[in-house]
């Protein structure tokens, strides 16, 4: 695909699920201009949260132009997102599953944020979204799925974490952090910095607590039922594959390097 001909814009909202009343449904979105959010849940709710996160990631990848979004997972231990796994070889989904891998990938994305602030963002291009509407040289977006139990650790300074989360959104980097309720009591200052930076959604016994910080029209919850996102993941994955045009993807003649990307 020719990036110069596409409208590279990150969606205005994260699709969290749907509101239903009688037989009518409507999607519930939370604004993306907050830069992301945190999901805090009990063990009973973990499976439902995992399903919502995986569907949200697949939906973004299936609706945005191919190569406009890369999703990173910072997590150790058991595998969570089986439907995303086939996308790893296409490098649109990357998993960092130990301290060394996480620290390396974090530094790479940190450098992307710093470089974009220094070279691309200015008074009339305050975000990568604005840059992409005005420039022929489109920049991709990043979504980080971050397990707060495993990251950030004590190896990465608090100052770096704070700078990262405060600067990420403007640079086209979004963060969805997740973890058990106990993370609210964590003595890790970096974890607390992330929880403070982003709006929190608490899930208990599979029930999502949606407040006005999450959803502007919270009064609708009085007579509507909320169901977290749970879509056909196989279908979404197939849509992502179709958008990728795999034959073109593996053709080495189509690999090009960008040069001279600074704002004049």
Image: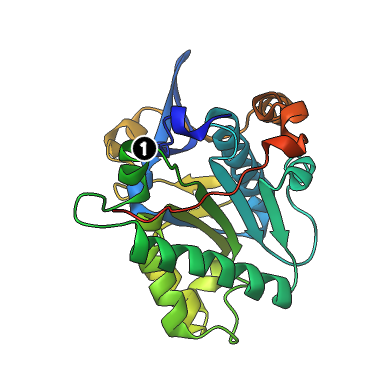
Q: Which residue lies furthest to the left in this view?
A: 123
Helix, strand or loop under label 1: loop
Residue closest to the eye, 43 or 175? 175
Q: Which quadrant would residue 74 be assigned to in this image?
A: bottom right
**In the image, residue 53 lies at what x, y percent?**
60, 45
- State the residue position of label 1: 12
Residue drawn at the location 26% of the way across and 53% of the way down: 126
Residue drawn at the location 45% of the way across and 27% of the way down: 5
The chosen color scheme is rainbow
Q: Which residue lies furthest to the top in this view?
A: 23
**In the image, residue 214 lies at what x, y percent?**
36, 47
Residue 55 falls left or right of residue 175: right
Residue closest to the eye, 194 or 25? 194
Residue closest to the eye, 195 or 264? 264
Q: Is residue 215 visible?
A: yes
Look at the image and tell me in which quarter the N terminus lies.
top right
Q: Label 1: how many residues lie within 10 Å, few (<14), some (14-19) or many (20+)?
A: few
Depicted 237 relative to depicted 256: above or below: above
Depicted 162 relative to depicted 217: above or below: below
Number of numbered labels in the structure image:
1
Q: Is residue 150 visible?
A: no
Residue closest to the eye, 149 or 234? 234
């Amino acid at each position: 695909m020719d990036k110069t001909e596409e409208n590279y814009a990150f969606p205005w909202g994260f699709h969290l699920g749907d509101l239903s009343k009688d037989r009518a449904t409507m999607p519930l979105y939370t604004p993306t201009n907050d830069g992301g959010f945190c999901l805090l849940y009990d063990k009973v709710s973990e499976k439902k949260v995992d399903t919502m996160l995986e569907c949200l990631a697949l939906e973004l990848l299936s609706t945005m132009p191919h190569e406009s979004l890369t999703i990173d997972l910072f997590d150790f231990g058991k595998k969570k997102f089986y439907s995303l796994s086939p996308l790893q070889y296409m490098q649109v989904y990357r998993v960092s599953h130990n301290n060394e891998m996480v620290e390396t990938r974090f530094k790479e994305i940190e450098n992307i944020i710093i470089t974009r602030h220094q070279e691309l963002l200015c008074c009339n291009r305050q975000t990568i979204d604005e840059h992409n509407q005005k420039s022929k040289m489109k920049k991709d977006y990043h979504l980080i799925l971050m397990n707060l139990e495993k990251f950030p650790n004590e190896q990465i300074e608090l100052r770096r974490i704070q700078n990262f989360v405060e600067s990420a959104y403007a640079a086209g980097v979004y963060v969805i952090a997740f973890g058990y309720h106990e993370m609210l009591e964590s003595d890790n200052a970096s974890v607390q910095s992330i929880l403070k930076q982003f709006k929190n959604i608490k899930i208990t016994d599979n029930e999502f607590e949606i407040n006005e910080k999450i959803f502007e029209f919270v009064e609708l919850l009085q007579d509507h039922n909320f169901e977290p996102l749970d879509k056909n993941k196989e279908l979404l994955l197939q849509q992502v594959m179709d958008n990728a045009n795999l034959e073109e993807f593996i053709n080495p003649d189509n690999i090009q390097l960008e040069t001279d990307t600074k704002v004049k």
